[in-house]
Amino acid sequence: MKTARHFLRLQDLDGRELEALLHRAVELKRRTRAGEAYTPLAGRTLAMIFEKSSTRTRVSFETGMAQLGGHALFLSPRDTQLGRGESIEDTARVISRMVDLVMIRTFAHENLERFSAASRVPVINGLSDGHHPCQLLADLLTAQELWGGLEGKTVAFVGDGANNMARSWMEAAQILGFSLRIGAPEEFLPGPQAMTENGSNTRVFTAAREAVQGSHMVVTDVWTSMGQEDEQEDRLARFRPFQVNGPLMAEAGSGAVFMHCLPAHRGEEVTADVMDGPRSLVWEEAENRLHAQKALMEFLSGFGPVADMEGV
């Protein structure tokens, strides 16, 4: 039996695969909007395991699987024996004998690694505390549609530079070769391991204004992620100088655009005038979760031109 191909972090794709996947997502989006039926995953099932709740992840994967002709099965902690003490490995062995793909949205990235090691079918990271690669696919797809890619561009990530989104942006810069600038309080900058592994195209700053100067895209994320609620007041105080607002966007220049992975807290990490203004690509970015993940599921299932490149 062929070993399953997993997608747990962006670097599970090489540069050639990632660029081909983004081009494929553009084509699948065109087909969807044109009303063209394309159902290569007919008769196949995606198991969606949620330890963390979500709006965009569930809707995009469930809709995407339906549009590809397959079926998506939602499993919360109440719906599996994982919530009652069954090991991750045993759950993986059972579920992967019954379905064709697994998407997991969880807390510890280690849980994904343990599950995928025991799984017979491809496992997709729908979000973990370590990485958010599916969101990066959507973000990169948005840039692909806008500029034809990020070659020669500079992206500024402002906020928690040690979180999963910042780490995934660092991986994207490493793979595709664009410039990434991270602005964060010193204690929230990327750690030494992240910089060693993926820091060659990343510069870090402890002032938001310096981070965004000369950038083509400004990206932020919530200051307090799920599971960090006890730190909220401290984080609000520490990150206040890193709010993305009109004056900060002005530092980036008149052509700079804004993105946010959502959900957003207007008045905290971003002001309403930026979030809902003409520079914001947030809603296109959110929709692109659907199209990018369709290309990913097609690829991991062994269909389409991206899979044909390597005979996946």
Image: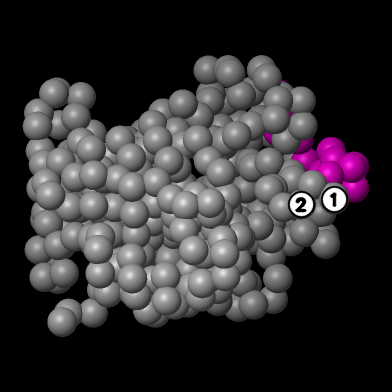
Horizontally, is 177 left or right of 245 in the view? left
Which residue matches tag 1?
231
The reply to whether discs 1 and 2 touch (Cβ–Cβ < 8 Å) is yes
Asked if the stretch drawn in magenta spans residue 238, the answer is: yes
Which residue matches tag 2?
228
Identity, as a three-letter code, of the amino acid under mark 1: Glu
Q: Identify which residue, 35 or 174, lies in the foreground.
A: 35
Q: Which residues are magenta?
A: 232-246
Q: Secondary structure at mark 1?
A: helix
Quadrant assignment for the C terminus = bottom left
Horizontally, is 290 left or right of 212 in the view? left
Q: Identify which residue, 304 or 183, lies in the foreground.
A: 304
Residue 171 makes an appearance in the image: no
Identity, as a three-letter code, of the amino acid under mark 2: Gln
> Looking at the magenta stretch, what is its main secondary structure?
helix
Q: Identify which residue, 250 or 106, lies in the foreground.
A: 106
Give the class, few, some or many, for how many residues have Cα within 10 Å of label 2's Cα (few <14, many ≥20).
few
- Residue drawn at the location 76% of the way across and 25% of the way down: 267
- Relative to residue 131, is residue 228 depicted above or below? above
Residue 301 makes an appearance in the image: yes
Quarter of the view holding residue 212? top right
- Residue drawn at the location 77% of the way across and 59% of the way down: 188
Quarter of the view holding residue 286? top left
- Relative to residue 62, is residue 174 depicted above or below? below
